[in-house]
Image (cartoon, rainbow, N blue to C red):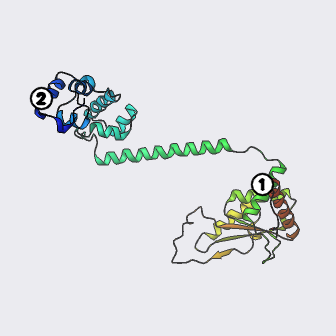
Amino acid sequence: MAHSFGKYADFETLREQAVALRRSGHSLRQIRDELKIFNNDILNQLLQGEPPPEWTKRPNAKDDLREKARELRKQGWTYNQIQAELGCSKSSVSLWVRDLPHPEPKCTPEEQRARMNAGLVELRASQDRERTATKQAAAIGGLSDRELFITGVALYWAEGTKDKPHARRESVEFVNSDPGMITVFLAWLDLLGVAGERLHCRVMIHESADIDAAEHHWADLVGIDRALLGKTTLKKHNPTTVRKNTGNTYRGCLGIEVRQGADPYRRIEGAWYGIVGAVAETDLGNRT
């Protein structure tokens, strides 16, 4: 029958027996069966302070890594270097070697900053190369007329002026600061048969920017003489705000309006809702 703590006639005698068995290499289970003590709490009290024999310890799969990490740390390796070398987590490295002294720095603080800055430069260059490669791989080759037409309809409906029931304005007006968007828009208008003389272009820009350079920039992009641009619209400067659109690359926006644009606008709107209807069965009652 298993012992209960209240029935032990001599706890110290049992402890001496349990300790003797432990020191002779017995496991907890063997001591339990030998002394008929099946209460784990009591058994642990009897063996308090006595380490288990080596043969009962489970092998640790990371023991070899731990020893290698400690050896590398003694050689002056950093946590990052050890992590990369052994393929383990930095938290494990820290746990294994935190009792060891910190390695002496191999370079001055200035040299460390220079190395860090050089590493950041290389990292950003690598990211830029990866970014560029991804974009180049995704680039579309050529466009059919149909593809350009659909692209232009979606582009206009996202960025162009639209007619509203509360504000009737059936006109084609497009404003954007992205030269690429302007280029695609102009190609689309050409596909629609809109002649260049029907276009009215004007620059919209902050009053503190280089207006002359902006006007030349957009006139060159459209392929017209600067004198043919409409009057530039200037945005007044608000001294309480901090502008981020500054520098030599800031050219403001270009607005393009198609004269006699009511009929083209109606066809654009019809094409757009045709696209919507093609991808979803929806109530198109929101047509303006």
Could you tell me which residue is drawn at 85 percent across and 62 percent down?
Answer: 270
Please state which of the two labelled residues, at mark 2 or mark 1, is closer to the viewer. 2
Specify whether residue 48 is in view. no
Q: Which mark is residue 151?
A: 1
Could you tell me which residue is drawn at 52 percent across and 74 percent down?
Answer: 241
Q: Is 209 left, or right, of 174 in this rendering?
A: left
Query: Residue 141: x, y in percent?
Result: 74, 43
Query: Residue 225: x, y in percent?
Result: 76, 65
- Label 2 SS: helix
Q: Is residue 100 above or below residue 21?
A: below
Q: Which mark is residue 16?
A: 2
Foreground of the two, 137 or 42: 42
Image quadrant assignment for residue 87? top left
Image quadrant assignment for residue 258? bottom right
Specify whether residue 232 is in view. yes
Could you tell me which residue is drawn at 59 percent across and 61 percent down?
Answer: 249
Query: Residue 205: x, y in percent?
Result: 64, 71
Q: Is 114 left, or right, of 268 in this rendering?
A: left
